[in-house]
Image (spheres, rainbow, N blue to C red):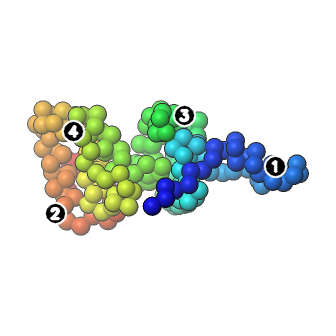
Amino acid sequence: MLAPKRRPPLTHRLLLSLAAAAGALVSAGCPSPEERACDRICDCSGCSEARYLECVDKAETARAAAVEASCTASFDEYVTCVEEELECKDENYLFDACDGQRDSLRGCGISIFRTVCEDANDVFVACGLGFPFSTNPDDCIGSIVCNARCIIGMSCNGLNGIDFEESQRFNECTSACFNKPQPAGSEPQPGGP
């Protein structure tokens, strides 16, 4: 099986576009903030054109959800932060400086650029517990999303059983995720069902 073709860096694509136009002035309009953020992500990770388009599509869908939830300001702040603060290390992108903006947007029930499962994996790794969830975004659905949100709401002491009360809240939260059906975008209540 052939590896997916990597997208050339943004500057390389721009130079190719200019050369193809034989020196003519190319006027394609300004990219949206979502496109610019996806450019930064894909320039770092070397994703394919299809993956880039998927990123933009998901970002535009998240923008529509933010508008519907009256969270446009939170969405704009997060996307701008990702575009400006993204760090690239060994083809992995990080935007830890945007945690506050991401949490504000997540408070509206909206996630973008990373799944809640990826965020939960980060918490588990930081607590020395490994990776509980698949890195495939298609697997982050339903009760899995609910369980991931329970993890994100806990400290390492709660997850490791050191803080008994917090550990109990975590157990109640995860039990609620698996004992009754959870819509894909539902928020668990950390204190219980």
Callout 1: 10 Å neighbours few (<14), some, many (20+)? few
Horizontal placement of 19 versus 72: left or right? right
Residue mark closest to the camera, 3 vs 4: 4
Q: Which residue is label 2 attached to?
A: 179
Are the residues flagged by discs 1 and 3 in contact, CB closer than 8 Å?
A: no
Sooner in the amino-acid sequence: mark 4 or mark 1: 1
- Which is more foreground, mark 3 or mark 2? 3
- The numbered disc on residue 19 is 1
Q: Amino acid at mark 4?
A: Leu
Q: CA distance from mark 4 to mark 1?
A: 51 Å
Marks 2 and 1 in Cβ contact (< 8 Å) = no
CA neighbours of label 3 inside 10 A, class few (<14), some (14 to 19), many (20+) = some
Q: Which residue is mark 3?
A: 85
Residue 37 x %, y %: 58, 45
Residue 95 x, y percent position in the rendering: 48, 37
Image coordinates for residue 134, horizontal then vertical, percent = 31, 53
Closer to the observer: label 4 or label 1? Answer: 1
User: Label 1's element?
Assistant: helix
